[in-house]
Image: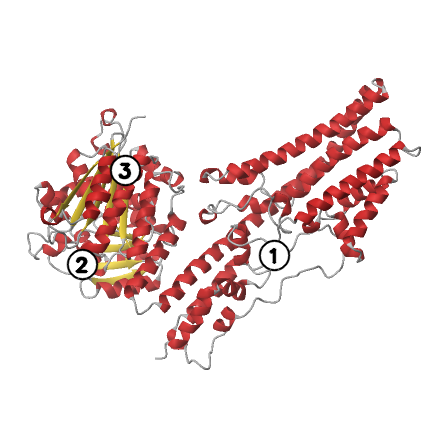
Amino acid sequence: MSGTQTGSGQEREPGPARMTGLAGRQARVVIVDDHAMFRSGVRQELGGSVTVVGEAADAPAAVAVIFAQRPDVVLLDVHLPGGGGVTVLREVLAREPEIRFLALSVSDAAEDVIGVIRAGARGYVTKAITGPELVAAIRRVGEGDAVFSPRLAGFVLDAFTGIDVAAIDEELDQITPREREVLRLIARGYQYKEVAKELFISVKTVETHVSAVLRKLQLSNRHQLTRWATERRLV
Amino acid sequence: MPKSSPQTRCVTIGHHPEHALNGVVARSGERTDDVLARSCDDLRVSSQPTAAAAPTRPAAAPADVSSPPAPGPAGRPTTRRVRRLRQDRLVAGVASGLGEHLGLSLLSVRVAFVALGTVAGFGVALYAALWVCVPLYRAETPSAPGLAAAERAGMRASARRFRVGDAGQLVAFGALALGLTLLVQTSAIGVNPVLFWPALVIGCGVLLIWRQGDDAAPTDHVSGARGSLPWRRRDVRDPDAPDTWSIDEPVRTSESAGVLDRSGARGPLRTHGWRSALRILAGGALVLGGLVTFVATSGRWGVVGDVLLGGLVAAVGIALIAGPWLLQTYRSLRLEREERILSQERADVAAHLHDSVLQTLALIQRQAQDPREVVRLARSQERDLRGWLYGQQQTPDSSLRAAFDRVAAEVEEEYGIPVEVVVVGDCSMNDHLQAVVQAAREALVNAAKHASADRTDVYVEVDERAVVAYVRDRGVGFDPVAVEEHRLGVRRSIVERMDRHGGRASVRSAAGEGTEVRLEMVRSRS
């Protein structure tokens, strides 16, 4: 069960300077999952910490509900009737790029994880995540940051490892040593504030690094990245 | 709220998953999807504690689950027709089938065939004719899908093994037939030896080839499905007794070896495919040798060319007339085979889900008072299903990734603390890396025992130079300087183990901040 980074999220005091995305109010959330039991479970767990404004059980319904409600954050199941989470991401982000997605799935297959991230999700957590961790992750995503679980960090490191750096001239196709350092610590189970302490940098800098990695992951059209994901299953 | 009733039901499920399967699934001719859906309904009913007015059970589900198997599926056809019985056969099952059909003892039918065989080979010809005409009997689905699946996966014993008596009888009959034949041949009524010996050789060749056809043709659909599902890969039954399995038992052909290619378990199977090819080759060689011998001894080389030409013309004619029809038959057979593979695979999936998930659900209900145990059960079931649904096809012990996954699973199982493993890169195992894995295991055990953390993270990074592993918990931690002397576990099994193999281990910990063990092993350049 991949945990997510809770530490610094809990630390923050709600203040106008920090709350760029949510501005101090509760995040408005849509839950998209084809299991009704799971939706109600999540709704219950989230309790009063966020405002659940809608639910959907398949991709078309999800798109409709999201356009109707315009939530801050969508909790999106990866495996979904009607084309999967990736379809929802594509259709929504084409029209409303400011809506943020947190992918939520039981699958931790590399192609699923990398797939939704590349389609535009700003984080990935597995369904075994605890309630408080999920609330923190939603808040983080709602504020425009990325949520990397150890597993996702591992996948990204894997994807960007083993390429001849000298042969690549595009900035998007490689991650900097510092970013690698941050990812490595996250993969080791460090929370953002622990990463910050370890590297003598601020939490904000850690978030900047993680967001940069996310951006590269989404924008890089390196063939290896997609091929890597598909090949992984055949190993 | 009475809670005892659902629990007692589940005890039945837990102890006898096979019965549960029989009760739920064994209605023949039903599609697997329906079965799945129906049994899911059953599941839902039996897991509702509110439906438990104990003495008067409203739903049929519990009765279904614990009832004995439905009256067996069609054991024998209603109209009695001769069929060859694979399970009693010495050569092709003709005698045993005939014996069963006529109500004669098997032995007397066999003796009759041998006796007739000595009369100018009449018995042999009769046997061959029956071999061709009488179909080989294959049982309709003999048991519930779950059981069949388990049997295919080698998780149940098959119905019948080879009996030593069979071999003895085969030898006896062979000796008897040979003796009688020689007796007849040496006497005046014998067949012309120029004809006889090549005929014998050709007969042996034909025997080999036909027998191979019997084994391979009707049954390889099962082997085709084998191995494509991960959980079955581990169990490969004794491949050395392919001729002696029960009626519908698969004979693994080279095709199954191909399917199994990825798993690395193909050694013995390939041997079998190779063996069947050898049989056909040997048979072909015998037939050809017999023909050549006949032509050579009869001294009529001149006719050979004419005969060959005639044969060729005939073959072309037959191909022109029957070709399209043969092709069509071949295609429809293929299609049917594919469908069969699919349905069997579906049945296996259903069986797997039933078996493992039902079992765990039952256990969870019984352990409901112990949250730790419930978590452990749920977690181990999750790992199982996850590996099955999304897992990578990896062979245990051959790769570092697999080794770490296994060690994590072991510790998790034993101590009930979730272990999250992230591996970047991979490489094959060797003794030094085994030391890293074992040291990491020790660190995990320490964390589980002493840290009282709610989970442990393992991170492994492999590059060309070295393997570095981190085991981290966010538990109570300790002061390394103060405690180091007492912690023999850490010293011996982690630090010294790594030292012995030329690696390095370091422990970072502070009271209240958790512990992180770092293990580094430089990869030998070989």
Compute the Cα span from label 3 to label 1.
47 Å
Q: Is B134 located above or below residue B257 in the figure?
A: below
**Label 2 lies in what chain?**
A
Give the image quarter of residue B103: bottom right
For label 1, the residue is B141
Residue B143 lies left or right of residue A197; in this view the side is: right
Nearest to viewer (mark 2 / mark 3) = 3
Residue B512 drawn at (x, y percent): 11, 54
Q: Is B74 located above or below residue A154 in the figure?
A: below
CB of mark 3 within 8 Å of CB of mark 1? no
Residue B223's disc is none
Is B403 in front, or is B111? B111
CB of mark 2 within 8 Å of CB of mark 3? no
For label 2, the residue is A27
Disc 2 residue crowd, few under 14, some 14–19, many 20+, Cα 10 Å:
many
Q: Are marks 2 and 3 on the same chain?
A: yes
Q: Is B364 located above or below residue A174 in the figure?
A: below
Among numbered discs 2 and 3, the one appearing first in the sequence: 2
**Label 1 lies in what chain?**
B
- Which quadrant holds the C terminus of chain A? top left
Disc 3 residue crowd, few under 14, some 14–19, many 20+, Cα 10 Å:
many
For label 3, the residue is A158
Residue A122 drawn at (x, y percent): 23, 48
Secondary structure of the residue carrying numbered label 2: loop
Secondary structure of the residue carrying numbered label 3: helix
* Residue A123 seen in the figure: no
Compute the Cα span from label 2 to label 3.
33 Å
Disc 1 residue crowd, few under 14, some 14–19, many 20+, Cα 10 Å:
some
Secondary structure of the residue carrying numbered label 1: loop
Q: Is A38 located above or below residue A201 in the figure?
A: below
